Amino acid sequence: MTPVVNAPAAQAVTTTKSIPAFGFSCISNKSEANCATGTNQFKAKVTEHSPTQVMFKFFNVGVDPSSITRIYFEDTDFKTLGAIAGIINSAGVNFSTTAPGNSNLPGGKSVDFQTTASVRAENPVRPSGVNNDPNAIGTPPSEFVAIVFDVLPGFSDPFNAVVTDLRRGTLRVGMHAQGFSDGGSESFVNGAVPEPITTVGSGIALGFGALMTRKRNLAKRKAAKA
């Protein structure tokens, strides 16, 4: 079972590597207003949780009612992400890997989204999701969920490998949200991902170096078995 911990554990973690928060684009387009709410309010940030782990932290900042209830990951090419090592819920949020629900991103076929990992809010779903925080503009949001992944072995710089995977589009993050003002729901996929804060100007080179190191290591292992 994936460990689920409370928010103080997340606050105790220190990191030297992160990327600025990035947003999401609506793919279901059932309601222009709801899509605009999600595009404006849903954010994610990636940090180095440990030398071999990364943490994806999700926020909902704004005045319009909404709740992030499911989060999906697609890592089907270079595959930098391993297993989900833990979930960190803030007060009022309750995500797990075992909650019932669709394991595929609703509307994901329109962008060829293939889920490789997902987490979902427990029942009651909307209250257990990441709800909007109208008071968090300019301050840390009161609600969040953070998903910690092990990074697959073989990368010289695991954090930059994951960031490069994101920036290339070979790793994508999707989410399903509900609880909008009209009661509707929408699906979203991440937009452009910024460079790491600690490696601005060289993040891409570092990331590709990490990916190439893993490819070389994999090639060596295959050659040794031949």
Image: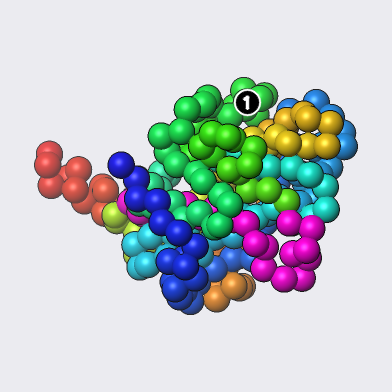
Q: Position of residue 59 (x, y in %)?
A: 65, 55
18 vs 99, nearest the viewer: 99
Q: Residues within 10 Å of mark 1 (few under 14, many from 20)?
A: some
Query: In the image, is residue 99 above or below residue 206?
Result: above
48 or 163, which is in the foreground? 48
Residue 129 location in percent, x, y?
Answer: 60, 43
Front residue (pair 30, 161): 30
**Residue at the (62%, 26%) spot, across then down:** 106
Amino acid type of the residue that numbered disc 1 sits on in the rendered structure? Pro
Residue 153 locus on image (x, y percent): 29, 54
Tell me the quarter of the image containing the C terminus: top left
* Residue 135 colored in magenta in the image: yes
Disc 1 secondary structure class: loop
Q: Residue at x 53, y 25 (%)?
A: 102
Tell me if residue 163 comes above or below residue 200 in the rendering.
Answer: above
Q: Is residue 53 left or right of residue 64?
A: left
Mark 1 sits on what residue? 106
Q: In the rendered view, would you say 90 is above or below 185?
A: below
Evaluate whether residue 46 shows in this view: yes
Q: Is residue 37 left or right of residue 178?
A: right
Q: Position of residue 202 (x, y in %)?
A: 56, 71
Residue 193 shows up from this direction: no
Badge count:
1
Quadrant where the N terminus is found in the figure: top left
Judged from this view, the residue extending furthest toward the left is 225
Q: Is residue 102 left or right of residue 82?
A: right
Dominant SS of magenta comes to loop
Residue stretch rendered in magenta on the structure: 133-152
Residue at screen point 78% across, 30% down: 183
